[in-house]
Image (cartoon, grey):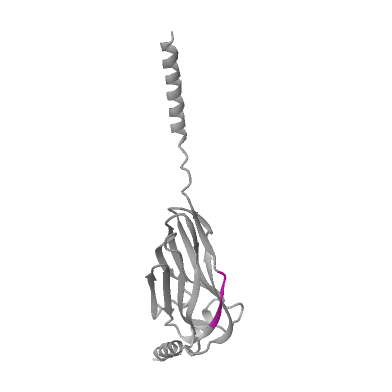
Amino acid sequence: MRKSISMLAAAVVLSAGLVPAADALTVSVVPQASAVNSGDTVSVDVVVDFQGDSALSLGSYDLDLSFDSSVLSFGSLSFGTGLSVTGVPSFVQEYHLGTGTLNALEASWETTADLIALQPDAFTLFTITFNAAQVGTSLLSLSVNSLGNAAGTESLAAAVLGAPSISVTGAPAVPLPAAVWLLLSGLGVVRGLGRSHKSC
């Protein structure tokens, strides 16, 4: 019952658009690579960091990640475990994909005490895997719709760190196996022998 009340309070606080409290919370987009070849995949982590403030904890979030859909195409999304500190599945865990925008939201079903005691100081909220669709550069821009504290009583303020990009270059040249080079060399020798035989 207490969990239901906390979740209901979180929904009311976040939908009411209350003025966020000033906190040391940061959210950042961390690509696993800044440059990939066309046809490759690349993973991007969205990470929250409490900047050493042990009084902070996160119970819910609603974030939008924008990207250039002509350069990167969505592959998959996996949620982290920072809102499920004892293994209790989250109350809400879903994402919505639009053209060049991905919205991810999650709300914890953990108790306030467990989130405060067990949540790490920094953790991955979710990881997106993109396919490198074509040559170009895609900016990765994150916007925060809402961040709720563990008790669901407060909307947290956060600084969004940076706006990284991923560059997609042409596919690398495929090296020919050594056996192919040997075969081509052999054909060259045979052709040379054929010419010398004709001139005799």
Residue 122 visible in image: yes
Say which quarter of the image contains residue 100. bottom left
The one of 182 and 36 positioned closer to us in this rendering: 36
Q: Position of residue 155 (x, y in %)?
A: 50, 86
The one of 16 and 129 positioned closer to us in this rendering: 16
Quarter of the figure that contains the C terminus? top left
Q: Which residue is drawn at 50% across and 81% down?
A: 58
Say which quarter of the image contains residue 68. bottom left
Indicate yes or no whether the magenta region holds residue 131.
no
Q: Which residue is drawn at 46% across and 54% down?
A: 135
Left/right placement of residue 49 relative to residue 88 reads right
Which residues make up the magenta segment? 157-162
In this rendering, is residue 120 above or below 194?
A: below
Quarter of the figure that contains the N terminus? bottom left
Q: Position of residue 103 (x, y in %)?
A: 42, 74
In this rendering, is residue 11 above or below 123?
A: below
Left/right placement of residue 76 relative to residue 20 reads left
Most extreme residue toward the right is: 52
Q: Is the magenta stretch mostly helix, strand or loop?
A: strand
Q: Which residue is drawn at 42% across and 20% down?
A: 191
